């Protein structure tokens, strides 16, 4: 979101909204599923990490919407 990790330094609204949504959802999925190198994180911890990276790695509006969807699925 802030362009720091993107090869072309694209940031904010210059990143297509579809990419911002997929990035946040993919990160949540990656954190909450088992991987060969680690066990899945608890949902609460994955949520905390999304919130922590909101505004830097992830679009804050996308994180907010994702968290609302997760709340609705409880």
Image (cartoon, rainbow, N blue to C red):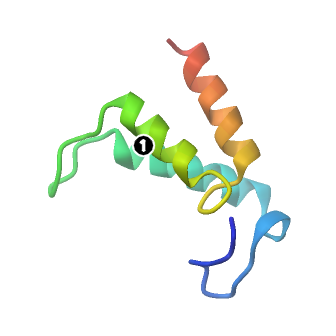
Vertical comparison of 26 with 14: above or below: above
68, above or below 74, in the image? below
Q: Position of residue 12 (x, y in %)?
A: 79, 66
Residue sitting at the far front: 52
Q: Residue at x 56, y 43 (%)?
A: 51
Total marks shown come to 1
The residue that disc 1 covers is 29
Quarter in which the N terminus is drawn? bottom right
Residue furthest to the right: 13
Residue 39: x percent and y percent? 18, 43
Taking the spot 61% from the left edge, 79% from the top edge, the residue there is: 6
- Pick whichever, 23 or 59, lies toward us: 59
Residue 72 image position (x, y, % from top left)? 61, 15
Above or below residue 43? Residue 53 is below
> Residue drawn 50% across and 12% down?
74
Q: Quadrant of residue 14?
A: bottom right
Question: What kind of element bears circle 1?
Answer: helix
Q: Residues within 10 Å of mark 1 (few under 14, many from 20)?
A: some
Q: Is residue 29 left or right of residue 70?
A: left
Residue furthest bottom in the image: 8
Q: Quadrant of residue 66?
A: top right
Q: Is residue 67 left or right of residue 40?
A: right
Position of residue 32 in the picture relative to residue 27 (left or right) = left
């Amino acid at each position: 979101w802030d362009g720091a990790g993107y090869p072309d330094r694209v940031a904010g609204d210059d990143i297509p909204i579809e990419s911002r949504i997929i990035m946040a959802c993919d990160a949540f999925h990656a954190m909450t599923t088992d991987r060969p190198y680690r066990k899945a994180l608890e949902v609460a911890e994955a949520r905390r990490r999304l919130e922590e990276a909101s505004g830097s790695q992830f679009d804050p509006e996308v994180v907010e919407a994702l968290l609302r969807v997760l709340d609705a699925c409880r």
